[in-house]
Amino acid sequence: MLPATARQRLLPHLALAPFTDRTITDRKHFERELARIRARKYATDDEEYHAGLVCVAVPVHDERRRACAAIAVHAPRSRMPLERALEHLPSLRRAAEAMSATFD
């Protein structure tokens, strides 16, 4: 996770271009979503980048506890709606913890 000061310096320079009609393009909404991701410790993509595709991702942390990678499950919404993708969170978290342990 990026420290708050670095995040505040970076956010004004991000182009929040729409990829689909669900892409977050409003800066305040984007900042609220980042706060939700930090609080939940996972991120979702509900057709925000590619229409028809959903994703759930969890971070992998290095030895300093900084996010250095992510493990995710992606699927077409028609085969796995976001609600069902969220059921994979326990497995994703276990896999991320196992990968993070390799940095210790």
Image (spheres, grey):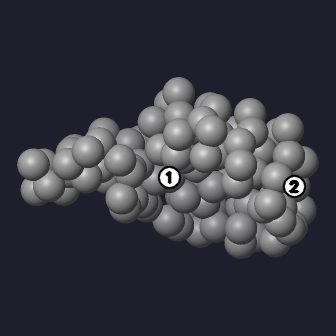
Q: Camera-side residue: 40 or 15? A: 15
Q: Camera-side residue: 26 or 83? A: 26
| Three-letter code, disc 2 | Thr
Instruction: Give SS at disc 2.
Output: loop
Residue 71 as seen in the image, left or right of residue 99: right
Residue identifier under label 2: 25
Q: Position of residue 21 (x, y in %)?
A: 89, 62
Q: Position of residue 18 (x, y in %)?
A: 86, 67
Mark 2 or 1, closer to the camera: 2
Label 1 neighbourhood size at 10 Å, few (<14), some (14-19), many (20+)? many
Q: Which mark is residue 103?
A: none
Compared to 4, does 96 lie above or below?
Answer: below
Q: Residue at x 80, y 60 (%)?
A: 13
Residue identifier under label 1: 56
Residue 49 as seen in the image, left or right of residue 88: right
Q: Residue at x 26, y 45 (%)?
A: 64
Q: Position of residue 38 (x, y in %)?
A: 53, 34
Compared to 99, does 5 lie above or below?
Answer: above
Residue 86 as seen in the image, left or right of residue 7: left
Q: CA distance from mark 2 to mark 1?
A: 20 Å
| Three-letter code, disc 1 | Val
